[in-house]
Image (cartoon, rainbow, N blue to C red):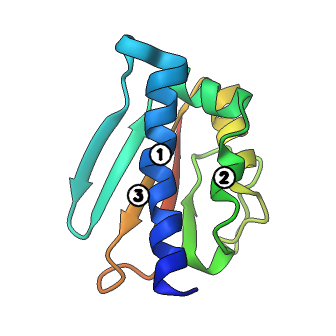
């Protein structure tokens, strides 16, 4: 993927966060940005995750080729398998988190430290 396409894909995460804040959660937004060694992230609370699921906003991130993202599945996920590989789309991961009353997080990772550019994290 070219740098310009990767930059555009990385911009989708804050754009989605802004859309949730404006369209769904409004002033009560609980979008939580955080960072760590080699990554920046945004965590959506349960209500925002349901909103992202209901509007199928996760489909925007499905445009990112699989080789650039990884997933941290919550224990008990229907997409879990022994090979640490999932055939689920990002939208399906969001839908599952929402259905279980959970949250979803997206990270943008430093490729010098992490093997994948983007991580999708389920929590419930």
* Crowding at mark 3 (Cα within 10 Å: few <14, some 14-19, many 20+): many
73 over 6 or under it: above or below: above
Is label 2 or label 3 in front? 2
Q: Are marks 2 and 3 in contact (CB under 8 Å)?
A: no
Q: Residue furthest left?
A: 37
Name the residue tied to disc 2.
60
Q: Please tell me in which quadrant of the rendered image residue 117 appears.
A: bottom left
Q: For marks 1 and 3, give the CA distance.
A: 13 Å
Q: Choose the circle earlier in sequence order: 2 or 1.
A: 1
x then y, percent, for residue 25: 47, 17
Q: Is residue 67 left or right of residue 105?
A: right
Identify the residue under disc 1: 15
Instruction: Give whichever of 14, 82 is nearer the camera.
Output: 14
Residue displayed at 47% across by 45% down: 15
Q: How far apart are the alpha carbons under marks 2 and 1?
A: 10 Å
In this rendered view, identify the residue nearer to me: 68 or 78: 68
Q: Position of residue 27 (x, y in %)?
A: 36, 13
Q: Earlier in the sequence, mark 1 or mark 3?
A: 1
Is residue 112 something that shows in the picture? yes
Q: Mark 3 highlights which residue? A: 107
- Callouts 2 and 1 close, C-beta under 8 Å: yes
**Closer to us: mark 1 or mark 3?**
1
């Amino acid at each position: 993927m070219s740098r310009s396409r990767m930059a555009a894909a990385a911009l989708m995460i804050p754009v989605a966060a802004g859309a949730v804040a404006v369209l769904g959660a409004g002033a009560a937004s609980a979008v939580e940005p955080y960072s760590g060694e080699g990554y920046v992230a945004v965590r959506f609370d349960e209500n925002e995750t349901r909103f992202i699921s209901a509007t199928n906003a996760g489909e925007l991130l499905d445009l990112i080729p699989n080789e650039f993202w990884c997933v941290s599945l919550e224990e008990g996920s229907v997409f879990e398998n022994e090979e640490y590989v999932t055939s689920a789309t990002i939208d399906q991961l969001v839908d599952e988190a929402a259905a279980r009353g959970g949250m979803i997080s997206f990270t943008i990772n430093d490729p010098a430290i992490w093997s994948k550019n983007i991580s999708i994290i389920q929590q419930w």
